[in-house]
Amino acid sequence: MLRLRFTAEDLMNVRFAARPAPLLELGMAVATYQRDDAVFARWTRRARLTGEARALLELIPPGANGPLFLDPYSDGLEDGLETVLSTPPVHVRAELVRTTRPTPWTTRLAGRDREAWRTLERALRGAYATLIVPDRERVRASFDADLAWRRALLAERGVAAALASLYPGSRWDGTTLEVEVPEESAHAPAGRGLTLMPSAFWTGRPMIGRHSDGSMLLLYPALTPLPLVDVRARDALAALLGRTRAAILSLVTEGRTTSELAAELGVSAASVSAHTKTLRGAGLIVTLRTGKAVNHVATPLGMRLLRES
């Protein structure tokens, strides 16, 4: 049984992740690559880990409980890799001892051997290019669909119902959420906050992690796992609005600034401003200024269009 103990303050500090975390999804993908999972059977046959990327199989088991330093919560691949490569040596050694059996390579990693760490970086980049990049659009579609449904549930029935829906068999005992899993463990946000993160690559039990600020991360299987995601609906929305405007509408379900949209889409801030002006005129988003930042958020009409497309 997994038990999550909340206070009233903790329940007020539950939030959804803004976007998929690249290295978290990669960790789940490497684990699923090794699992006998009927949902992912065709994906597993298609996916290929070759060359140095296969070194990750020494670190990430099918149960996904590998070293915590390997899959930090980050907005992008590069800042995630920077976090991995700057992990303090004492934490690296402790995590490798806790989660892996000694091999020549993991032993060199624990000793901070420079070439071993270069291999790790190349392995992460190679695996990301092989397992994540070809399905990046499906990953985002799975993420957006899950959060759209849970936000609607949160609005209609409250945070307790939204949390209990994360995994089958979950139930509340007072202010403790109990999740039916084989292992016994107990965790508490302890006033530091809880972030909910759906994974398109994971169908197993919820996983608990920690941010560098001490807050808790709960990773759980998305409602629609990657192989079942139908991107044709997203294509239809793109045909209606244009691909860039459809992407902006999808991203601003959690709110984005103009500069954040420009960075994520790889376009200029001027281009983003032109597209958001069109979306705002159609009543699909609203724009709010906070200091120097210009924030864009989807309206209920925009959210409805996303859900029904």
Image (cartoon, rainbow, N blue to C red):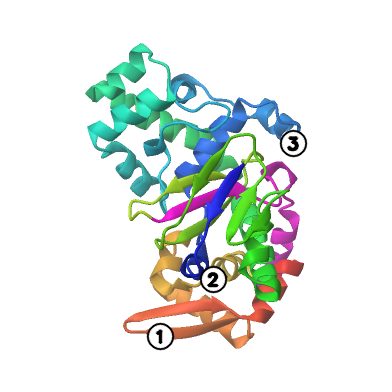
What are the residue bounds of the magenta stretch? 215-241
Give above or below for 192 relative to 302. Answer: above
Give the structural element (helix, strand or loop) at label 3: helix
Q: Is residue 107 left or right of residue 131?
A: left
- Distance from disc 2 to disc 3, alpha carbons, whole Å, reads 30 Å
Q: Residues within 10 Å of mark 3 (few under 14, many from 20)?
A: few
Asked whether 168 or 263 is in front, the reply is 168
For marks 2 and 3, give the one nearer the viewer: 3
Give above or below for 229 relative to 181. Answer: below
Q: Residues within 10 Å of mark 1 (few under 14, many from 20)?
A: few
Look at the image and say whether residue 307 sits in the magenta stretch.
no
Asked whether 170 or 110 is in front, the reply is 170
What residue type is disc 3 on?
Val
Give above or below for 249 relative to 124. Answer: below
Task: Give the residue at the far top of this rendering.
Answer: 104
Asked whether 21 or 204 is in front, the reply is 204
Q: Are marks 1 and 3 in contact (CB under 8 Å)?
A: no
The percent coordinates of residue 284 (x first, y second) are: 63, 80
The percent coordinates of residue 63 (x first, y second) are: 57, 30
What residue type is disc 2 on?
Val
Q: Which mark is residue 252?
A: 2
Q: Which residue is mark 3?
A: 39
What residue type is disc 1 on?
Arg
Give the structural element (helix, strand or loop) at label 2: loop
In primary-sequence order, the first of circles 1 and 2 is: 2
The percent coordinates of residue 117 (x first, y second) are: 29, 27
Q: Which residue is mark 1?
A: 289
Q: Residue at x 59, y 71 (%)?
A: 249
- Distance from disc 1 to disc 2, alpha carbons, whole Å, reads 15 Å
Q: Residues within 10 Å of mark 2 (few under 14, many from 20)?
A: many
Q: Is residue 24 left or right of residue 177?
A: left
